């Protein structure tokens, strides 16, 4: 589905990603872990097309297309979805209007007609149920005044409506209470098919109890320094990053 | 060398004096003072503090070297009327009863026909001819005017449709006097359109509005004149005890629009709400100068202006708040927010608070920026294209002002014009 080769990216002249290699196939769940500031959000932003970052080297192929050539909106239309670590508040734009516009632009890109109003409402209702999002939130301005947990749940709600091929969840678990965590994870699992894939960025094993990854990667100082199965996350939970830090400190100077 | 200032002003004075329009309803003393003020001070140029960014003298020098005042009789006003309202049609400032709806529940007439006692009491009492050249010009040369008298509660909104229709370089000085008696309530809509193909029109519009005790006036101004029209729109509002004057100004058209909106809270417990939204493009200039004068205690004023400037256009907001010594327990708030859509567009904002009372709550804030990049990226990351993402954000920016419009047909029209202007 996506192949990332030797990806380097910098911001304001500072190199943050320093040679990322990663391959995700359809049907897989990958977890990316790593200490604060290691570049996890940078990687997701670069994949989603944030223009603040400059890609200096490397390539990303997404379903046969050169992803880095595409505008952020075209990436989304091709099926990339980023659940933001910090969802943005947009006062004055209603959640519903926002989603309808997004869905219809994606459909137009694929040569499909606008979704009939009735079908859209039905879709919204169904997906609201899936992530147990309060109907009132759907009618409010995008994320405005939402609690931290509500914002995260709203991200998954959007994902449920837009049905992406590759979802990147950037710390979607942070700020969620135990129940919400289960609901969100459940939502993600229900949306999983053999044709889509998920990258889960998290600091905690807890989420991975619910969304069980096929692979776990450790990102450190802009590189994936270790990959393994789901047991790698358990190992990290027990030992922390000390070993990793000791081992790769010199190499990254 | 001839002084150009006097020269321009003299051209205007001569051209209007010979046009045969006699201002019979205006007090003689006001007319004399007005002419004297104009002759002495002339049209304000860029050195004039109040007209620093809005140089109307340059406009006169460029476009009004000679005035032909050729008015056209071609009219198509039907599409501009508002359903469910009392539509009053003014062509170049002259009230046309035959084009207008029957004014039920309110008194409407030309100023010539208005009650002399009321005119003596109110006309030219609030707009000071010694304070501003355009007040003076209007007072000296207005040849026609509209009088509206509201008693009790006016059921239907009153829509004054101001049509400018000219085929020559024209100067129009319409005058309006609106009296809301004690406990009266009305919604007032003023819209401004233009027709004809005049090379230039200067529309110097002046309204005096008296809001008596416990009266409530909700007013809307919709400015959508053509690209050859310059408009100076002066409103002098007086609010008496427990009176409420709310005004919403939407500016989308005109080449240069200067709004002088002055509200005097002349007695205790008065309320004033001043809101405005503009979108400028091309080389348009829109200048909102507001003044809220808190003269007595326990009054409240609230002000929110927003602007979007595109291309090489200019937006100006200058908001003065006076809180006089007597005006204890005043609440006065002001906010101006603007978005620049191009590097060549300009926004100038200037809040001016002068507070002489000690027990008051006042605040003001202005901001001018670009479209929020984080929000833009968020929308794009969901598949929304650049153009529609920007549009969504600009609509959101303007929404709180458009939502204030309580007349549905008007809100729809404003929304349509706003989106067209983007
Ligand atoms: N505009 C910027 N200028 C300079 N450095 C930046 C800028 N934006 C991000 N960085 C740096 O890039 C590094 C990686 O940040 P990133 O947000 O990708 O980390 P992360 O792995 O997501 O961390 P966390 O676990 O805390 O979310 C950090 O050191 C951060 O300070
Ligand atoms: Mg992060």
Image: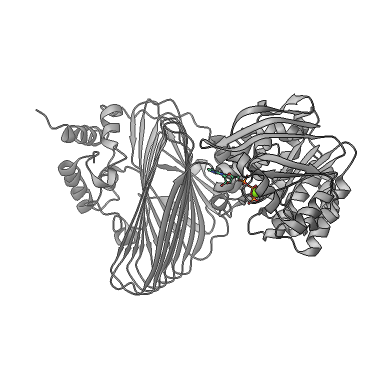
Q: Tell me, what colour scheme is on the image?
A: one colour
Q: Is residue A158 above or below residue B182?
A: above
Residue at horizontal 25 percent and vertical 39 percent from the top:
B46
How far across and how far down the image is residue A118, in percent?
A: 83, 45
Q: Is residue B196 above or below residue B220?
A: above
Residue lying furthest right: A194
Work out whether residue A69 or residue B225 is closer to the camera in this orientation and state it. Answer: A69
Q: Is residue B393 above or below residue A68?
A: below
Q: Quadrant of residue B67?
A: top left
Q: Is residue A56 left or right of residue B36?
A: right
How far across and how far down the image is residue A190, in percent?
A: 88, 49
Report the quarter where the C terminus of chain A lies: top right
Work out whether residue A119 or residue A15 is closer to the camera in this orientation and state it. Answer: A15
Report the quarter where the N terminus of chain A lies: top right
Q: Quadrant of residue A150?
A: bottom right
Q: Quadrant of residue B40?
A: top left
Residue lying furthest left: B1
How far across and how far down the image is residue B269, in percent?
A: 42, 72
Residue at horizontal 54 percent and vertical 36 percent from the top:
B422
How far across and how far down the image is residue B264, in percent?
A: 35, 62
Work out whether residue B221 or residue A177 is closer to the camera in this orientation and state it. Answer: A177
Q: Is residue A131 visible?
A: no
Q: Is residue A61 left or right of residue B269?
A: right
Q: Is residue A185 left or right of residue B260?
A: right
Q: Is residue A44 visible?
A: yes
């Amino acid at each position: 589905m996506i192949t990332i080769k030797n990806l380097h990216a910098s911001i304001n002249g500072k190199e943050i990603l320093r040679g990322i290699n990663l391959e995700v196939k359809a049907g897989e769940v990958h977890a990316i872990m790593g200490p604060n500031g290691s570049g996890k959000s940078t990687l997701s932003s670069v994949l989603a097309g944030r223009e603040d970052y400059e890609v200096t080297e490397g390539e990303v192929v997404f379903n046969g297309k050169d992803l880095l050539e595409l505008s952020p909106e075209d990436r989304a239309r091709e099926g990339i979805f980023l659940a933001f670590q910090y969802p943005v508040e947009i006062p004055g734009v209603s959640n519903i209007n926002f989603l309808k516009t997004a869905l219809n632009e994606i459909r137009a890109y694929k040569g499909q007609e606008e979704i009939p109003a009735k079908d859209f409402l039905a879709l919204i209702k169904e997906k609201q149920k899936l992530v147990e999002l309060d109907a009132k939130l759907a009618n409010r301005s995008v994320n405005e005044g939402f609690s931290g947990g509500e914002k995260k749940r709203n991200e998954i709600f959007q994902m449920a409506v837009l049905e992406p091929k590759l979802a990147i969840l950037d710390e979607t678990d942070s700020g969620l209470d135990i129940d919400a965590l289960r609901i969100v994870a459940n939502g993600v699992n229900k949306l999983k098919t053999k044709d889509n894939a998920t990258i889960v960025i998290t600091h905690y094993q807890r989420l991975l109890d619910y969304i069980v990854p096929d692979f776990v990667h450790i990102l450190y100082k802009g590189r994936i320094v270790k990959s393994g199965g789901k047991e790698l996350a358990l190992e990290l939970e027990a030992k922390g990053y000390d070993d990793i830090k000791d081992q790769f400190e010199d190499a990254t100077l | 060398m001839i002084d150009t200032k006097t020269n321009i002003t003299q051209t205007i004075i001569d051209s209007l004096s010979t046009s045969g329009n006699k201002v019979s309803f205006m007090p003689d003393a006001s007319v004399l003072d007005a002419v004297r003020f104009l002759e002495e001070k002339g049209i304000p140029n860029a050195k004039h503090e109040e007209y620093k960014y809005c140089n109307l003298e340059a406009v006169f020098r460029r476009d009004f070297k000679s005035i032909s005042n050729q008015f056209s009789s071609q009219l198509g006003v039907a599409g501009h009327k508002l359903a469910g309202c009392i539509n009053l049609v003014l062509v170049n400032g002259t009230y046309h009863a035959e084009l207008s709806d029957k004014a039920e529940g309110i008194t409407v007439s030309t100023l010539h026909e208005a009650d002399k006692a009321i005119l003596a009491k109110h006309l030219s009492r609030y707009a000071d001819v010694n304070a501003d050249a355009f007040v003076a010009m209007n007072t000296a040369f207005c040849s026609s005017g509209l009088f509206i008298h509201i008693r009790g509660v006016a059921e239907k909104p009153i829509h004054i449709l101001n049509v400018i229709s000219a085929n020559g370089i024209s100067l129009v000085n319409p005058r309006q006097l609106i009296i809301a008696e004690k406990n009266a309530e009305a919604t007032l809509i003023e819209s401004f359109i233009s027709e004809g193909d005049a090379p230039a029109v200067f529309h110097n519009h002046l309204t005096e509005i008296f809001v008596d005790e416990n009266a409530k006036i909700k007013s809307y101004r919709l400015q959508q004149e053509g690209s050859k029209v310059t408009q100076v729109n002066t409103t002098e509002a007086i609010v008496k005890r427990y009176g409420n004057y709310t005004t919403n100004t939407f500016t989308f058209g005109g080449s240069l629009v200067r709004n002088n909106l002055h509200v005097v809270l002349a007695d205790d417990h008065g309320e004033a709400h001043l809101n405005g939204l503009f979108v400028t493009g091309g080389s348009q200039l829109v200048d909102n100068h507001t003044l809220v004068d808190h003269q007595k205690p326990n009054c409240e004023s609230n002000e929110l202006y927003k602007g979007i400037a595109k291309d090489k256009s200019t937006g100006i907001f200058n908001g003065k708040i006076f809180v006089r010594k007597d005006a204890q327990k005043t609440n006065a708030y002001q906010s101006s927010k603007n978005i620049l859509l191009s590097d060549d567009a300009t926004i100038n904002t200037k809040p001016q608070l002068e507070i002489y009372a000690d027990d008051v709550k006042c605040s003001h804030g202005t901001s001018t920026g670009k479209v929020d990049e984080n929000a833009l990226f968020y929308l794009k990351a969901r598949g929304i294209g650049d153009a529609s993402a920007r549009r969504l954000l600009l609509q959101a920016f303007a929404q709180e002002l458009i939502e204030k419009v309580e007349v549905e047909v008007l809100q729809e029209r404003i929304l349509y014009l706003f989106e067209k202007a983007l």
